[in-house]
Amino acid sequence: MATKIAVKPATQDWFDEGVATFGDRLEAAREAAGLTQKALAARLGVRDSTVKAWEADQSEPRANRMQMLAGMLNVSLGWLMAGVGEGIAAPADRTDDAQALAATLEDVARLKWQMRALTETVARVERRIGGQIGGAAE
């Protein structure tokens, strides 16, 4: 399956209409508000499958629901519909996230190596103690 990669011109905002879809903005605003699809659906009085369809750009809410969404998610109606006006901040630079994850993975690898080395040291000490106990019993 091919992955879509959107190239963002320097003059465009992350959530502009040409970069992100309504579903993208809805999902980002919902997550920024700390809501699950199910929780948002319950607040709006719709099925969670309806919210899923909106976020997947398979359908769009009616005007009254759109206004409710904007209010609940603390974004402007214009931002939610077209990425214009008050909305949420663009996601953090993925490079920073990837670098932080790589550093964490390096830490895990280093800890695994240290644990393996310590396990081998413990095994050697146990063998030495076993040899000393066996030699003392003779």
Image (cartoon, rainbow, N blue to C red):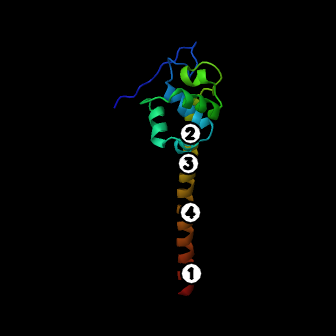
Q: Secondary structure at mark 2?
A: helix
- Mark 1–mark 2 CB contact (< 8 Å): no
- Residue 133 shows which numbered tag? 1
Element under disc 3: helix
Residues 46 and 8: in front is 46
Q: CA distance from mark 1 to mark 3?
A: 37 Å
Instruction: Give how far across and how far down residue 29 sits, in percent.
Output: 59, 32
Task: Tell me residue 65's x, y (percent).
Answer: 55, 32
> Picture quarter containing residue 86?
top right
From the image, state whether disc 4 or disc 3 is nearer to you: 3
- Between 10 and 39, the residue placed more toward the observer is 39
Decide: few, some or many residues near mark 3? Use Cα within 10 Å; few <14, some 14-19, many ≥20.
few
- The image shows residue 16 at horizontal and vertical percentages of 55, 19
Residue at the outermost bottom position: 138
Q: Quadrant of residue 105?
A: top right
Label 2 and label 4: CA atoms lie apart by: 61 Å
Of the two numbered discs 1 and 3 on the same chain, state the one appearing first in sequence.
3
Q: Does residue 96 appear in the picture of this structure?
A: no
Query: Residue 108: which numbered mark, if any?
Result: 3
Residue 121's label in the rendered image is 4
Which of the labelled discs sits on residue 44, or is there none?
A: 2
Mark 2 vs 4: CB contact within 8 A: no
Q: Could you tell me how far apart the alpha carbons at marks 3 and 2 are, in whole angstroms?
A: 43 Å
* Badge 3 vs badge 2, beta-carbon distance below 8 Å: no
